[in-house]
Amino acid sequence: MKDKYGRTVDYLRVSVTDRCNLRCFYCIPKEGFTYIPHKEILRYEELLRVIKLFTRLGIKKIRITGGEPFVRKGLVFLLKEINKINGIEKLYITTNGTFLTQYMNELRGIKIDGINISLDTLDPYKFQEITGNDGLERVLQGVESALEANFRVKLNTVLMKKNIDEVTSLVTYASEKKIPIRFIELMPFNFQKEWEKEFVPQEEAFEILKKKWTLEPVEKKLGEGPSRYYYIPELDSLVGFISPLTHNFCSSCNRIRLTASGKINPCLAMPLEIDIKKPLRGGANDEELITLIKRAIYEKPLQHEMDETPQTKS
Ligand code: SAM
């Protein structure tokens, strides 16, 4: 379906849990963070019902995310059930990669159209500093396992002062694995002070890469998302940039989100949420829920309000 600005919304990101085995400083605040109680998290049958209703409004692509999706028990069951839903054309997962090797035998037979693996550094000490966890080796093994099982893999790297010195080694690593890597600008969720200290605009990484290799813009749209890609002929490799702050992509945003606790969030960067869990658990029928989903899609904001000037809000 289209929102009120005429954008077709056909992509739903589903967060299946707010829990994660990593604690990236830019994602989970150091203090004042509490997990959502289990009973407030949508059960799988609830999730599947809501996803089916979304498909009736034209959602065709689903991305499973979190928290860390593999932290939630029974994720493989959910993936299989989503694949049975009429109207779902693509199913993707975003993961930190630490559980991929463990789950690969179960995942092998499932139609998953792409696995995005988050990897901010190749340095185990920095990995520990960023994520509070010593799991870098498990992530790298996870990349290998997914590739051996023939899944399409992309890497996501959040750009920050802590890893700007690694952009060329990360691109080299990705090219050796023959997978695209995308650099994502750090967004200022929940952690204004560190964000001001750590934010690096996309151009900085671009300039570093340009000094070493040729970056040819790729005109054709690759993938479903907002990444702008460049081809590096010397490596026969693709590097992408996702720059919500310096080059916002709101005008072509095709996505909507469902949080683990059953809120529809039409824009990741805005605190706008529509609760679907309450009516769902209160006995609403499909038509009532569809009316709610329609409203959420229709009311998708024209653009977010983040920018790269330091903000004074705490
Ligand atoms: N746990 C999974 C993972 O690590 O990919 C899925 C959830 S995680 C929230 C999804 C992506 O959001 C990761 O690539 C993560 O690095 C990115 N992310 C989290 N906080 C961010 C921020 N403040 N700015 C930019 N990207 C962020």
Image (spheres, helix red, strand yellow):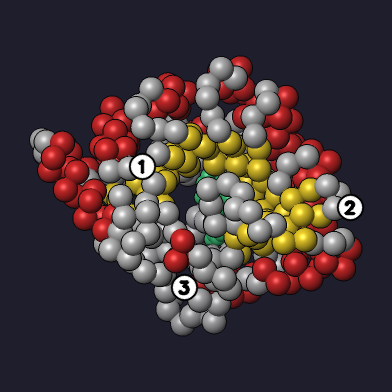
Point 85% across, 62% down: residue: 214
Labelled disc at residue 306: 3
Residue 84 coordinates in the image, percent (x, y): 38, 22
Q: Which residue occupies 43% across, 39% down?
A: 62
Which residue bears the numbered disc 2?
Answer: 234
Q: Is mark 3 within 8 Å of ligand 1?
A: no
Q: Amino acid at mark 1?
A: Ile
Viewer-proximal residue among 106 and 87: 87
- The answer, for residue 295, to whether it is visible in the render is yes
Residue beneath the point at 47% across and 23% down: 76
The label nearer to you, 1 versus 3, is 1
The answer for how far apart the CA atoms under marks 3 and 2 are is: 36 Å
Q: Amino acid at mark 2?
A: Glu
Identify the element where label 2 is drawn.
loop
Residue behind mark 1: 59
Please name whichever residue, 302 or 133, is drawn nearer the observer in this view of the structure: 302
Residue 148 lies, in percent from the top left, at 72, 24
Crowding at dot 1, Cα within 10 Å, few <14 / some 14-19 / many 20+, comes out as many
